[in-house]
Image: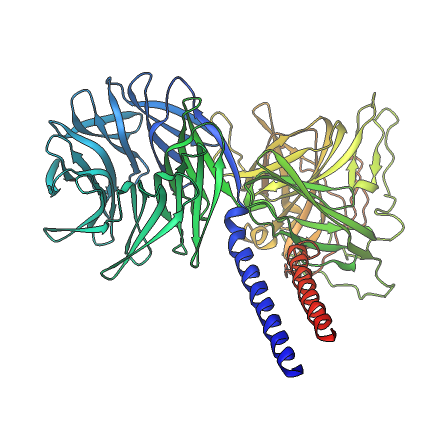
Amino acid sequence: MHDRICTTTGRRIQHAFLILIVALFFSQVLSHVSALDWVTETVDSSGDTGWYTSLALDSAGNPWICYLDWTSRHLKYATKNEGVWFNGTADPVNGTGEYCSIKLGVTSQPLISYYDGNHGNLSFAIKNGENWTRETVDSEGVGRYTSLALDYDGNPRISYQDLLNMKLKYAQKTGDFWINETVDNSGNVGTYSSLAMDSAGNPHISYYDAGHGFLKYATKAGSTWTNVTVDTTGNTGYYTSLALNDSGNPAISYYDAINRDLKYATKTGSTWVKEVVDRTGNVGLYTSLAFDSSGNPSISYYDSTNGHLKYAQKTSSLWTNVTVDTAVNSGLYSSLALDRKGNPRISFRTGGTGELRYATGISPLLLDFNASSTYGTIPLAVRFTDLSTGGLPSFWNWSFGDGTWFNTSTGDLNNPYHVYETPGVYTVNLTVQNFTVESTLSRTGYITVITPEDTILPTASPSPEPTITRTPAPTSSPDPTWTPIPTESPYPTPTTSPVPSQSPETTIDGGNDLVISTVPPVTCLQSNLTVNVGGDSAFRRITITGRDLSGSIITAWKISSLPAGVPPLDTPVYQYIDVISARLGVISAALIEFDVPLVVIREHHATRDDVTLCRLNSSTWACLPVLMAGSENGRMVYRAESPGFSLFAITIRNDTGTGLQEERIPLPSATGTVPEDGAITPVEPVISSAPVPPIPASPDTSLSFMPSAILAAGIIGMILVVVLITQGRIRQ
């Protein structure tokens, strides 16, 4: 008896394990669709509109939608670019636009097939530039239930119904001529046709046989059409949508009117496999099918019981579905397309308000980042990498914890490089704007910077510079020997020549790595802010002085040609740079830090002292005082003070250049002494050091493991309960 009880107990535990494993599997499979964030927006609300929508995405992911405006009875189209929707009329003739189908050509120009109800014709329109060209493809009672596809060369192909003769037809254009042919004339056929072209240029069409109530499929190889019946169970085959999977096999989504279910059929070899996708209520009208890059099918459709738009996706062997839009009668004439990341986009009509709407499904934003180094001595150079996934981010803000931050709205520039110059423990924050919501990930004490131990470093021998004769030119000094920055103060007290009493007072703000000379009298409270510059130029960071500077964004872009009316420089130019600022308050000065590769300087047969920064001021170029601040990784670092932002040019003078001014701008000697006519406060050189390689650190999993941990804890808890209950029964 004891052995039998133990055996029964073991089986119960095995069953419990199986149940938990199955639950874990389904929870992981269900996670993708249920986790999507859906954003719905109104595209057109001018009257009773949004009928017969058809959606296509261009190479940049921008949507194009064709639809019928029932109020004007015109064929219309809508497209979205840079966040703005534009609506236009593709055919202004009254009674046109029913059963429209849109595709994008090789140059992303829209092509539309549609029914001209005013004349009973199949029509075709193509947009070139700002103009639409329209033509009649077939006439005399034809053109309903059109479906447009393009072959490999971009030639249009159309399936449609000949209502007068109740047959399915197919049209193809080669050159300037349309050729029409009959696909199936076995009774009342051809409604709800859906067309796709395979890689060999063969057409595949799904359609409804109204005479028998069957779902049918036709394909052409060479000059022969083959028609087969796919599903004969009841009155089935309404609202068909056909797509080809990654193996070139056809699949069809459709509506079963007897059972009121959404169904799906796929062909492998010569066999059709049919399954029910959703049977909750009266579901499956207005289906639209698409495959992602992994071969998983997705379907948008209408839930007639609740009047909602729904979306289903199959992963492995399991279908999951979610409700997308719950507005009244929302989801009519749905059309689905997947972007390059596999995210669904759906155009549809909302019958309650008579609007054309557009839904976007995106995986939730999960914030994450790492750093190439989180511990080291000053100066500590760190490359931060945004590892966030999902969402639709449009703005990034990095706060480094030392009073500086970096902002950008360009996704390619969201991994900033930052140098910590003061010992301390720093908290790093990453804020990402997703749609209209900002999310922040904060890591307390993430970066630790310490003071290096006192050591005696050998003096580096400067590389000899070639002897260059200049007229006039100051006596060239050898490159300075770089020494570590003293820990008690970011900058040493400069040695300056006497300044006349009537000159403005020179000020130094070492705490913000800012040097400002000849500052005008300040009448209100000012502050300093160091901003890491976005863009693709040689500008690294800019320290600005002024009022209301919080949240300032500065982006610098190198430009290949000057704007009209701007005179070119007569000195070799390394980069022309345009500075664009946002959220900027009132500034009184800006200290610009930039770098130039040593190899570029040598290519111009120049020395390190020959680099100059010029600023455009009222159509005239003026040189700014420039200080050499050190070198990093084969690049010379410079700083220049500017009264404001404009168009800049980094120039490299040499002994053959003519220069921009009568006198050369004086530069400080290696000892840090400022010439009397320069009145420039020297800047502490940047220590030359090997760059910190951007080695990704292990991502912080302090938050990402929580769902799995909770699930695992639940599983363990359930197992313990089963074991305890079983043991209790054994003791009894």
Instruction: Evaluate whether residue 665 shows in this view.
Output: yes
Q: Is residue 174 visible?
A: no
Quadrant of the snapshot with the C terminus = bottom right
> On the image, which quarter does residue 177 sit in?
top left
Q: Nearest the camera: 264 or 458?
A: 264
Q: In which quadrant will I find the N terminus?
A: bottom right
Question: Which quarter of the picture shows residue 435?
Answer: top right
Q: Is residue 362 above or below residue 86?
A: below
Q: Residue at x 63, y 30 (%)?
A: 582
Residue 538, image x, y percentages: 60, 44
Quarter of the view holding residue 660: top right
Instruction: Determine the residue positioned at 81% across, 46% down.
Output: 672
Q: How is the image coloured?
A: rainbow
Q: Nearer the viewer, residue 342 or 130?
A: 342
Q: Residue at x 90, y 50 (%)?
A: 488
How many numbered marks does the figure carry?
A: 0
Q: Of residues 560 and 192, which is closer to you in this image?
A: 192
Q: Position of residue 581 (x, y in %)?
A: 63, 31
In percent of width and height, residue 712 lies at 66, 62
- Residue 561 in percent (x, y) is at 47, 35
Q: Is residue 645 left or right of residue 171?
A: right
Q: Is residue 551 left or right of residue 345?
A: right
Could you say which is closer to the camera, residue 717 or residue 45? 717
